Image: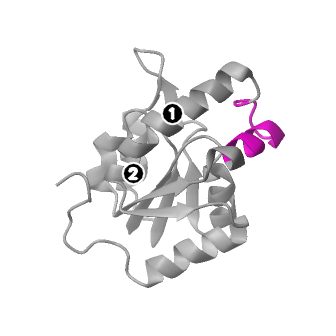
Amino acid sequence: MKRILLTGMSGTGKSTLIRELAARGYKAIDTDYGYCERGLEGDWVWREDAIRQLLASEDADILFLSGCVSNQKTFYPQFDLVVLLSAPAETIIERLKSRTTNAYGKTEDDLAEVLENLETVEPLIRRGADYEIDTRAPVKEVADLLLEQLDGGIIPNDGLRRGLQ
């Protein structure tokens, strides 16, 4: 089974893409729901036991997980591919203000945090990612691109992840 992490800042389309992949019949799980908790420093972290159990499953050809948490790098060796979903700040702000599925990003404090994370956290994720997709296109096109790239062999053969060697 191939294990693929879709990660990125709030508003880049992780949840939307994971829903699209699930609608297409893939095992696709948004880890924001049931797999996260507040860490000791107040940040969001994966519940390690739950993520280990997900990653140990063998009930599909491909497992897509979406999320962006402070301890995700711990699990990078267990993923075949880490894909950074990205978008310009203007796109992210527009999405956060207009989305109805999640209240995060509606306040000025939330928006300031997102913009700070875009400047400080996204570059760290970029260094550890195998591949990056700009998500400004409609979600169906983003999903098509991801699946085409998977068919085309973007999964590294050498077992080394850029930025983690």
Amino acid at dot 1: Asn
Q: Which residue is mark 1?
A: 117
How far across and how far down the image is residue 98, in percent? 83, 41
- Helix, strand or loop for disc 1: helix
At x 36% / y 42%, what residue is drawn? 124
Q: Quadrant of residue 120?
A: top left
Q: Is residue 70 above or below residue 61?
A: above
- Helix, strand or loop for disc 2: helix
Amino acid at dot 2: Arg
Q: Quadrant of residue 78?
A: bottom left
Q: Is residue 154 above or below residue 71?
A: below
Pick the front one: 54 or 150: 150
Query: Are dots 2 and 1 in contact, CB under 8 Å?
Result: no
How far across and how far down the image is residue 99, in percent? 80, 42
How far across and how far down the image is residue 51, in percent? 41, 43
Q: Which residue is mark 2?
A: 126
Q: Is residue 8 above or below residue 47?
A: below
On the rendered structure, is 163 left or right of 33?
left
Range of residues picked out in magenta? 92-105
Pick the front one: 17 or 98: 98
At x 75% / y 30%, what residue is drawn? 103
> Which quadrant: the N terminus?
bottom left
